[in-house]
Image (spheres, helix red, strand yellow):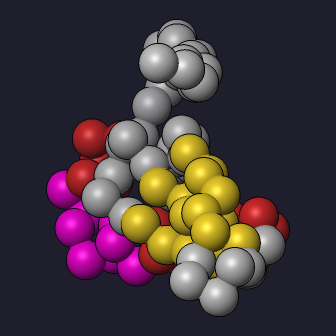
Amino acid sequence: MSMEIGLNIVIEREKVSNGCDVFIATSPDINVFVEGKTIDEAIGNFIEGAKFHLESFPQERKELTQTSEEKFEMPMVTKVFL
């Protein structure tokens, strides 16, 4: 039986050269970086990329699998202006 893995992802909006927005999805948990034209597309692409990554590196899946007894800290994301 396979256990679920919860991954934190960060989605950032970037302007590309033609002036359109693109959304970049990354994770501090695994080395996956993807983009999409929408947030939903970026999330979908991230899920596909994460699945492929974990199939390629099964030892990381074991490290990321958590039991229900373990607690998680929520990451803090903020913006600062200098």
Residue 6 x/y as whole percent: 56, 42
Look at the image and give the residue range highlighted in magenta. Answer: 52-59
- Asked if one can make out residue 76 in the rendered structure from this viewpoint, the answer is yes
Measuring 65% from the left and 88% from the top, which residue is drawn there? 18
Above-or-below relation of 47 to 31: below
- As rendered, which of 59 and 15 lies closer to the eye? 15
Q: Outermost residue, bottom direction?
A: 18
Q: Is residue 53 magenta?
A: yes
Above-or-below relation of 7 to 12: above
Q: Is residue 21 magenta?
A: no
Q: Outermost residue, front direction?
A: 82
Residue 32 x/y as whole percent: 38, 64
Residue 72 x/y as whole percent: 52, 16
Residue 4 x/y as whole percent: 57, 48
- Asked if one can make out residue 68 in the rendered structure from this viewpoint, the answer is no
Measuring 41% from the left and 66% from the top, which residue is drawn there? 33
Q: Is residue 58 left or right of residue 77?
A: left
Judged by its main secondary structure, the magenta piece is helix
Measuring 45% from the left and 31% from the top, which residue is drawn there? 66
- As rendered, which of 47 and 82 lies closer to the eye? 82
Q: Is residue 5 left or right of residue 53?
A: right
- As rendered, which of 27 and 18 lies closer to the eye? 18
Above-or-below relation of 59 to 6: below
Above-or-below relation of 12 to 8: below
Q: Quadrant of residue 45?
A: bottom right
Q: Quadrant of residue 13?
A: bottom right
